[in-house]
Image (cartoon, grey):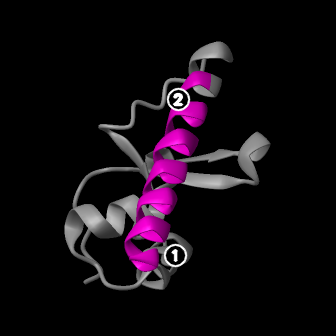
Amino acid sequence: METNKTNQELEDLIRESEKALINYCIAYGKAVPTDQWVTIKEYCKRFGIEDTQTVSDWIEAGIIPEENMVIIPEFKDIRMIKAVQYNDV
C-alpha cells in the first residue's frame, strides 16, 4: 500500500533528522539528550496532546519556562523543550 510506504518513509526521515540533531549537539557541545529534551511534536506524542499549537501557546504564555526550552538556530530555530509535564492552569 502506498500510504504505508509513505508513512514509513516519513518515520525514517524523522529518525534520521533526530540523529542529525543529536550529532550536531554533540559536535558543538550542546547537551540536549533526546530522552529529556524533545521537539514540540514529540512532546505532544509523549503526553497525548492533540495539537502542537497548544504547546506553542504554553511557550508564549510562559507556562513552559525559558530554562526548559532550547532554540537551535542551525536547525531552522527548532525549539526543544524539556520533557516534563506542564499544566496550562
Disc 2: which residue: 22
Residue at the (58%, 55%) spot, across then down: 79
Element under disc 2: helix
Q: Position of residue 67 (x, y in %)?
A: 48, 45
Type of amino acid under label 1: Ser
Q: To which quarter of the image does residue 5 belong?
A: bottom left
Write the start and end of the magenta stretch as one range: 1-23
Does the segment drawn in magenta span residue 12? yes
* First of labels 1, 2 by sequence position: 2
Q: Nearer the viewer, mark 1 or mark 2?
A: 2
Q: Position of residue 82 (x, y in %)?
A: 37, 48
Looking at the image, do the residues carrying marks 1 and 2 touch, with CB atoms under 8 Å apart? Answer: no
Question: How many residues crowd mark 2 within 10 Å: few (<14), some (14–19), many (20+)?
Answer: some
| Residue visible at 50% across and 24% down in the picture | 31
The label on residue 56 is 1
Circle 1 SS class: helix
Q: Residue flagged by tag 2: what amino acid is it? A: Ile
Residue 42: assigned label? none
Examine the rendered structure and indicate whether residue 19 appears above or below residue 29: below
Locate the N terminus and report the quarter of the image it occupies. Answer: bottom left
Answer with left or right where residue 81 lies relative to residue 89: right
Q: Does residue 79 show up magenta in the picture?
A: no
**Residue 12 appears at what percent x and percent y?**
47, 49
